[in-house]
Image (cartoon, rainbow, N blue to C red):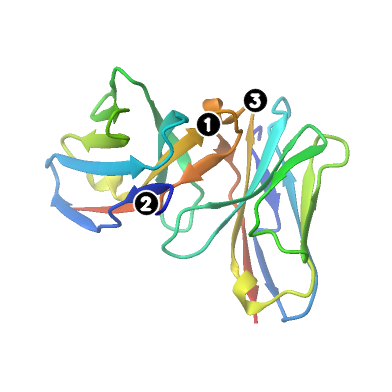
């Protein structure tokens, strides 16, 4: 499968726990993006990387959120001390260039905080 | 004002109907435009890019009006399989990120 892979597909966690999600982009894509989507809304931008450099972070990304792409390949998104408001679908996407090219999305990780 | 605005719908249309969705964007520096399709509980998938001259892909036609900051999507001869949410998407000049609208839900019935 040469698409964007995300793991896990679903995660249920108790409030206050830490969670980490992984994204493997299409191998030749140097841009990697994280978005969050809640019911009835479009995807909201969180952050993006060009190779290993994190170039932009949304103000939606509080101090509890951190993302890395250490070798310019896969990326991880960690949420510390989860809150019920963090429940959402976390989508990863990759692109061979900038936004002009459009993105290819992974299937997402659905997080439920109980 | 939201950066990308769409009528959330739902639009309920019979098979074979023609349906049009509209979208407005607030940043005149926007450079690239797309329509994405999202099925229930699935990821968004690129439907088509939108070019200044307008473009067509089978039953789907996209139009862009830069002066009015307005994008449209026309679906002819609707199929049951067209039932989905259609997301209007804009890229702002000199940024790499895409801004998504909230989506317009389409339901095609027999």
Q: Residues within 10 Å of mark 3 (few under 14, many from 20)?
A: some
- Rendered residue at 53%/39% (across/down): B98
What's the chain of the residue with tag 2?
B
Mark 3 lies on residue: A96
SS at mark 2 in the image = loop
Task: Measure how far apart labels 3 and 1 are at the Cα level.
Answer: 9 Å
Do the residues under discs 3 and 1 have CB atoms within 8 angstroms? Answer: no
Quadrant for residue B37, please give it: top left
- Rendered residue at 53%/26% (across/down): A100
- Rendered residue at 50%/43% (across/down): B99
**x then y, percent, for residue A110:** 61, 63
What's the chain of the residue with tag 1?
A
Mark 2 lies on residue: B103
**Mark 3 and mark 1, same subunit?**
yes
What's the chain of the residue with tag 3?
A
Is residue B89 visible in the rendered image? The answer is yes
**x then y, percent, for residue B2:** 41, 53
Quadrant for residue B76, please give it: top left
Task: Measure how far apart labels 2 and 3 are at the Cα level.
Answer: 25 Å
Which labelled disc corresponds to residue A102?
1
Picture layout, residue B65 above or below residue B25:
above
SS at mark 1 in the image = loop
Picture layout, residue A17 above or below residue A72:
below
């Amino acid at each position: 499968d040469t698409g964007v892979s995300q793991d896990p597909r679903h995660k249920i966690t108790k409030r206050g726990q830490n969670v980490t999600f992984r994204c493997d982009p299409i191998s030749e894509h140097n841009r990697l993006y994280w978005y969050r989507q809640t019911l009835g809304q479009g995807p909201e931008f969180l952050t993006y990387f060009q190779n290993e450099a994190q170039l932009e972070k949304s103000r939606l990304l509080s101090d509890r959120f951190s993302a890395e792409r250490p070798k310019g390949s896969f990326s991880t998104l960690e949420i510390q001390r989860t809150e019920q408001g963090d429940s959402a679908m976390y989508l990863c996407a990759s692109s061979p260039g900038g936004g002009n090219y459009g993105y290819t999305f992974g299937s997402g990780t659905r997080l439920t905080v109980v | 004002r939201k950066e990308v605005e769409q009528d959330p719908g739902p639009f309920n249309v019979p098979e074979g109907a023609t349906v049009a969705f509209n979208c407005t964007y607030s940043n005149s520096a926007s450079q690239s435009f797309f329509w994405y399709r999202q099925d229930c509980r699935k990821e968004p998938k690129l439907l088509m890019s939108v070019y200044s001259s307008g473009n067509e892909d089978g039953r789907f036609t996209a139009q862009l009006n830069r002066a009015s900051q307005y994008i449209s999507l026309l679906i002819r001869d609707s199929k049951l399989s067209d039932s989905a949410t259609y997301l209007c998407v804009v890229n702002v000049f000199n940024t790499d990120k895409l801004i998504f609208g909230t989506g317009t839900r389409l339901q095609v019935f027999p």
